[in-house]
Amino acid sequence: MTTTTTGMSAQDGAVAPPQNRQGTLPDRQRLERAMASFVQDFGVTAALYMESCVHCGQCAEACHYYVQTGDPKYTPIWKIEPFKQAYKRQMGPLSPLYRLFRLKKPVTVGELEKWQELIYDSCTLCGRCTLVCPMGIDIPSLVLAARHGMQEAGLVPHDLWEPTDRAEREGSPLGATKQVLKERIAWLSDDNNVKIPLDLEQADILVTVSSIEIMKYPQSLVALAKVMNHVGASWTFCSDGYEATNFSMLSGDRKGQHDATMLLINAALAVKAKTVILPECGHAYQAFRWAGANVYGKPLPFRALHISEYLAEEIRAGRLTLKSDPRSMTFHDPCQVARRGGVSGAPREIFKALGADLHEMSSTPAANWCCGGGGGVVTIHRADSLRHRVFHLKMQQVEDTGADILVSSCSNCRLTFDDGQAFFHWDKTAHSLLELVADNLAQRH
Amino acid sequence: MNGASLLDFARGPAFEAAVAMLSFGIVWRLTGILALRRSVDHSRPRTGFGWMGGLRMIVSRSWPRREFRERVLHWDIISYLFHIGYAVAILGYVPHILLIRNLVGLQWPGLPGGVIAFAAGISAAALLALLGHRMTSPVLRQLSNFDDYFSWFVAFVPLVTGLMAYYNIGDSYQLVLGLHILSGDILFAWLPFGKIMHVILFAFSRGTTGTVYGRRGAAT
């Protein structure tokens, strides 16, 4: 019996529980598509990772899901076990031996469905496991490859598939369509008396945004505009390419990821931008700064900067001048920006320029605990209670700093913090670094 | 087969077959991995010295970061006791050095037999502790497969038989020595086909990730 995304049986109309399957493909085809996709991802790097694992289990000790639950199924490398099994059986240099002696069983759709929770609900792609692995295996890249396979097989959790599908149809996972963007910009511009350029023919800088900011934190757009105007930049939003979150990357949809990336690239080319500024969104940074050129197939003819990098650059150039804000603060480094993105110095330059009393967290920016909402996990409601358990680690880490104010530079983290704050009745709210800067712009004389 | 003929077999055809399997296996497995598609990273590197991140990670990943030590350092230390003890026993024992000299022409001064026995004993004890950990930790039990236990076995037996030969335990010295050399042959032959291949692969996988992270300017 096959089911659709509505959960209705294709044959008898009865309600069937698995809404977390897309399409009506028979299992055999789902499996073939998953494996074909997985093979497509396989190159030297993934093979090296698959071959090098010594089953030491140390990745579990770095994973917030395992640390908080003690459940071995959350061991990061275990999360890709069916794909590892498929690799060893079908692709590895020893695969003839594995098949000859039946050392690895073929993977089944049932196994992939069972693993859906591990591949999606309990991996934020934070990469803390990479940092502890004695073999240096970058497990998130393997989880992403597994997600590609799951997407091809139509086995994505519905809660993540739905916004991804919406992003592909409407240009935004949260309904922040081109029209909504235009209305928001008009409204925010009027209400805040700030100039927000949209669809200029030419600008040195194309700014992009996360749908979370448009829909939940619209003041971020105002803050961005204030800063850009303050430094006297030539900049614009472009309604043909503005949404940088790239949910398709998170669900494993390569085509959707490609299309979302190309919208931004084409918009940047159209306005002849020299720089694209990526919003306070970790996955947007990862998807465009590090994966964008590979989607494009050649180096991007412009720079791509996270907003915090741009702010630090402008401070260094003396164009961004700030008032002192000596309050006691701590900073949550978004995993995709710091640990996996390489940006950890820029936010600290900004805090220094603000004269803030910065209380660093117990771990270095690279080994920071994830907020628990990355990788699309925050959208998957069946994972809420697990997400709250891992959020507790983050909350404790923030509390241990003794700082009064929590700041981050990722709207997805901020959303996760807001949810955790409400759940735990916590007295800390996560603030935006960009908004903090905009609130402290020095007067121009 | 008596002790003398076992010794001849272990030193002769078995050893030659083991070296052949070791060489062929390493080349086969490495080629099978390294000949795969290599994707070009078109992203603009933050630093032009990403490869230095690769070199750095090859070294840095030998010891856990401060943040992880509380949870993993004790097992790392036990693992190091096994590895270092093993290396001392292999590379410091004079008969082993003579074998290496005959094979590749390199030689160095050996260590006293007592030191070698001590190192081998520590290594064997550490290996037993690691096996106990693997069999009792839910995480490791879940991850472990035939390769993990068989690789443990082929690493452990040469230590035990080596110590038995050194202390002349057993009825026939020739038989024990023959078993020791044969177990070494099996270790050589198995190395490329199981997890022990990590003695070579670790540098490749660490170096690969380190290079990716290095060009991003991320911690390596």
Image: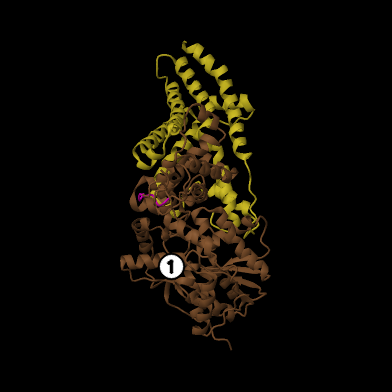
Q: What colour scheme has been applied to the protein in the rendered image?
A: by chain
Q: Which residue is mark 1?
A: A414
| Chain ID of residue with mark 1 | A
Magenta highlight on residue A251: no
Report the predominant secondary structure element of the magenta stretch. Answer: loop
- The image quadrant that residue A287 belongs to is bottom right
Q: Which chain is yellow?
A: B
Magenta stretch, residue numbers? A14-20
Question: How far across and how far down the image is residue B77, in percent?
Answer: 42, 43
Residue at the far bottom in the pictured view? A445
Question: How far across and how far down the image is residue A419, in percent?
Answer: 37, 66
Determine the secondary structure under disc 1.
Answer: helix
Q: Nearer the viewer, residue B189 or A35?
A: A35
Magenta highlight on residue A18: yes
Q: Nearer the viewer, residue A237 or A276?
A: A237
Report the residue at 51% width, 84% height from top.
Answer: A190
Report the residue at 57% width, 54% height from top.
Answer: A255
Residue at the far front in the pictured view? A12
- Asked if residue A438 shows in the view, the reply is yes
Label 1 Cα neighbours within 10 Å, binned few <14 / some 14-19 / many ≥20: many
Residue at the far left in the pictured view? A425
Q: Nearer the viewer, residue B204 or A161?
A: A161
Report the residue at 39% width, 54% height from top.
Answer: A64
Horizontal side, residue A22 vs residue B103: left or right: left
Horizontal side, residue A289 vs residue A157: left or right: right
Vertical arrangement, residue B24 with respect to residue A216, above or below: above
Question: How far across and how far down the image is residue A148, in percent?
Answer: 52, 49
Tell me which amino acid carries mark 1: Arg
- The image quadrant that residue B126 belongs to is top left
Colour in which the image shows chain A? brown
